[in-house]
Image (cartoon, rainbow, N blue to C red):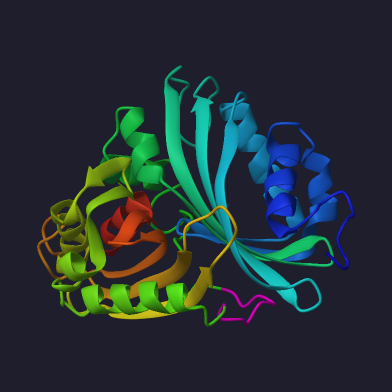
């Protein structure tokens, strides 16, 4: 781990370790060390630059959810310490909504939801990030629908003209990481599968998935079997039938004591012009940032984790209307 603190034995240990140190051990000030001063952090809801903005957002989140835990399930990564490394970090977070904040007045409700975060790191610092929280799962557990939460957020942020604008190709900012991942066969396999699905070739699902597959989808949805996968992907693509689909980053890995696995960051950019998971077609231009992780077994794709932010999609639809 050339250039990194020797207390970290490898890159997954670095990612898991600094996450716990920052959030659960309250080492928020270490963000000055672990995050580059001019870092670009993209979430579907916004683009934030600079570690001061990240520190402010971290403190606001911990004020609203003081008992928040971030339990790292896996780190799928590529690169080298010398050239920089990209981690796709899958987290399950638990928290209790005991403080007022961006989600409104404290409800006291316990939450559980997933996060997928792609982070580029070099010389012991993260300098580029793509972060997806399962906002749909969060707001549902608080009693909102994603659409109603998005509408209320627009109002609380000052209305359509003043509110924070979601991430799109028009609001995105360039960061230092220009890599595309690696050429491992499992990453290629997942990227080709997603490309077939988004090309309306839904035959890919029964052909490529294990019949007993375990699925974890945005909105806190858990499913099993190929019909559940078909329903999820059809609902998304049907809402944006002509949107441009892009594979933006691909990692595949073979590691001891782990199944073959892959992480793909992808996006959709186009009009909401179909009946699907987002109601009446609105004609709004919508950007969907997604991350999918998968594990493979002897009978095909056996576990899948896919996240995008439903509330950011609804915000774009409502703002266009």
Residue 278 visible in the displayed image: no
- Count the marks: 0
Q: What percent of the width, then of the height, locates residue 314?
A: 29, 54
Quarter of the image holding residue 6?
bottom right
- The main secondary structure of the magenta stretch is loop
Q: Residue at x 16, y 76 (%)?
A: 200
Q: Is 170 left or right of 37, judged from the image as shown? A: left
Q: Dividing the image into 4 quarters, which one contains the C terminus?
A: bottom left
Task: Please tell me which residue is depicted at 45% across the width and 74% down the height of the picture.
Answer: 187
Residue 92 at x, y = what percent?
A: 50, 39
Q: Nearer the viewer, residue 132 or 164?
A: 132
**Where, by quadrant of the figure, is residue 119 drawn?**
bottom right
In this view, 99 is above or below 114: above
Where residue 44 sits in the image (x, y, percent)? 45, 59
- Residue 35 higher or lower than 219, as above or below: below
Q: Is residue 145 visible?
A: yes
Quarter of the picture containing the N terminus is bottom right
- Indicate whether residue 148 is drawn in magenta: no
Q: Residue at x 21, y 80 (%)?
A: 199
Q: Residue furthest top?
A: 108
For the point 15% across and 77% down, which residue is it? 201
Magenta stretch, residue numbers = 173-181
Q: Quadrant of residue 63?
A: top right
Asked if the stretch drawn in magenta spans residue 176, the answer is yes
Whole-percent x, y for residue 286 in the image: 31, 68
Q: Report the front residue among 251 and 130.
A: 251
């Amino acid at each position: 781990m050339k250039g990194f603190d020797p207390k970290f034995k490898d890159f997954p240990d670095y990612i898991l370790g600094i996450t716990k140190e920052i959030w659960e051990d309250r080492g928020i000030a270490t963000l000055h060390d672990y995050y580059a001063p001019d870092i670009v952090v993209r979430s579907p809801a916004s683009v934030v630059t600079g570690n001061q903005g990240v520190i402010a957002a971290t403190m606001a989140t911990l004020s609203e959810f003081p008992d928040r835990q971030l339990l790292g399930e896996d780190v799928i990564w590529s690169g080298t310490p010398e050239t920089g490394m990209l981690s796709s970090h899958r987290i399950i977070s638990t928290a209790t909504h005991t403080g007022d904040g961006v989600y409104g007045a404290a409800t006291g409700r316990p939450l559980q939801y997933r996060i997928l975060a792609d982070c580029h790191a070099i010389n012991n610092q993260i300098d580029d990030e793509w972060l997806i929280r399962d906002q749909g799962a969060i707001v549902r557990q608080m009693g909102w629908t994603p659409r109603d939460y998005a509408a209320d957020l627009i109002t609380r942020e000052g209305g359509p003209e003043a509110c924070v604008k979601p991430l799109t190709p028009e609001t995105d900012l360039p960061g230092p990481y220009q890599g595309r991942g690696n050429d491992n066969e499992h990453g290629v396999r997942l990227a080709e599968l997603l490309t077939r699905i988004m090309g309306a070739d839904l035959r890919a699902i029964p052909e490529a998935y294990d019949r007993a597959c375990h699925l974890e989808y945005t909105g806190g949805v858990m499913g099993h079997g190929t019909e559940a996968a078909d329903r999820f992907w059809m609902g998304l693509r049907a809402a944006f039938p002509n949107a441009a689909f892009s594979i933006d980053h691909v990692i595949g890995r073979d590691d001891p004591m782990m199944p073959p696995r892959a992480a793909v960051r992808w996006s959709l950019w186009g009009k909401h012009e179909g009946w699907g998971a987002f109601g009446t077609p609105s004609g709004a231009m919508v950007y969907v940032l997604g991350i999918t992780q998968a594990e493979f077994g002897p009978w095909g794709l056996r576990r899948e984790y896919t996240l995008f932010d439903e509330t950011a999609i609804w915000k774009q639809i409502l703002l266009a209307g």
